[in-house]
Image: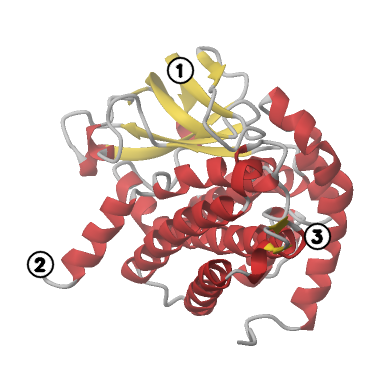
Amino acid sequence: MRRTLYDDDHEAFRASVRTFVDKEIAPHVDEWSAAGITPRELFTAAGRQGFLGMEVPEEYDGGGVADFRFNAVLGEELLRVPDAGAGLGIALHNDICLPYFLGYCTEEQKQRWLPGIVSGELVTAIGMTEPGIGSDLASMATTAIRKGDHYVVNGAKTFITNGIHADLVITAVKTDPTERHRGMSLLILERGMAGFTRGRNLDKLGQHAQDTAELFFDDVHVPVGNLLGPQEGQGFVQLVANLPRERLSIAVAAVASVRSVLEMTLAYVKDRRAFGQPVGTFQNSRFVLAEIATELDVAQHYVDDCVRALNDGELTAVDAAKAKWWTTELQGRAIDRCLQLHGGYGFMNEYPVARAYADARVTRIYGGTTEIMKEVVGRDLGL
């Protein structure tokens, strides 16, 4: 079914992104995957092309276009490379971190940070998860106790995407440790602050080109002027408000991943022969690929409607949760079936389907597990 989400401007943008990906990312994926990190210069290269902060107002050097369809195009094109981690940091920077700076920064903070976010000279990350707490953010142990014109931050975060490269980390802290949700605030911790250190670049199952790190805070003095929002205690509300967009970004990437793997699998089964005929001509192969193609189209149109809803300010937490859990579960089972059609070659890392299989596993976990997403939907049903 024909997609109607994009117009000519979006497709022209896609052509530019595709050229960038083919030139700046695809030739280096093997090297970056082996290193466990993309080069810091990838962000400034993306910034020079206008691929960062597209919705940032022009007065802060941004594109001034608040249209998430451009983000979706960028995400779709980044997923064309074999290792999803190669472009994940850019998507996190644009889709997940940027709304906090646009929505909660003071004018002084915007002037201080937004131009660097647009140019790629300031890489962003968000620090929510802590060792041992998983999805229970209200149980976080990282504290920020105010002393005069500073907060003193102590604690740790883990599984932080862009953790090694990040210059600005949106950090969830307890400014009132006696409270749960109402005691949470968001502080911007900056590279170079005394007591702010990074642990190892974590060794993951997939998304190897993406740096994912542990962060440690030992009596870090953070200026009160780095608090996001007008007052303390707003952190949980701020996080909840931005989760629908985060989950939609993950859904966009999941559908794009399925489409990429389906295309490579179709090419493979048409070329690979067994028992004297192409693998794709067997009825089982046709049925499997027909099922994936159908589920992909259904998921694509739901996600496209969610993108429209986000642009119109109407995307609900429930609709985003539906998109997130359904598309990531689809991603897992579809890529698994495509790998099966590759036979033994599908188990070899030199084949992109193997990398896509490993990359896909975490998407059912980060941004809210499938179980949490179903809980969001179930509660909306009055259960």
Q: Dot 1 corresponds to which residue?
A: 216
- The answer to whether any part of residue 25 appears in the image is yes
Could you say which disc has been placed on residue 381 in the image? none
Location of residue 18 in the rendering, given as x and y in whole percent from the top left corner: 82, 60
Tell me which corner region of the image, top left, top right, bottom left or bottom right, holds residue 381: bottom left
Earlier residue among tags 2 and 3 = 3
Is 332 left or right of 154, judged from the image as shown? right
Location of residue 127 in the rendering, given as x and y in whole percent from the top left corner: 45, 34
Q: Dot 3 corresponds to which residue?
A: 17
Tell me the element at label 1: strand
Tell me which corner region of the image, top left, top right, bottom left or bottom right, holds residue 124: top right
Tell me the element at label 3: helix
Q: Quadrant of the C terminus?
A: bottom left
Q: What whole-number distance in Å separates the C-alpha atoms at marks 2 and 3?
A: 44 Å
Earlier residue among tags 2 and 1 = 1
- The answer to whether any part of residue 108 appears in the image is no
Which amino acid does the dot numbered 2 rest on?
Leu
Q: Quadrant of the N terminus?
A: bottom right
Q: Residue at x 67, y 34 (%)?
A: 209
Q: Residues within 10 Å of mark 3 (few under 14, many from 20)?
A: many
Q: Residue at x 87, y 58 (%)?
A: 19
Tell me which corner region of the image, top left, top right, bottom left or bottom right, holds residue 224: top left
Is 276 left or right of 182, judged from the image as shown? right
Tell me the element at label 2: loop
Q: Residue at x 35, y 67 (%)?
A: 322
Which amino acid does the dot numbered 3 rest on?
Val
Which amino acid does the dot numbered 1 rest on?
Phe
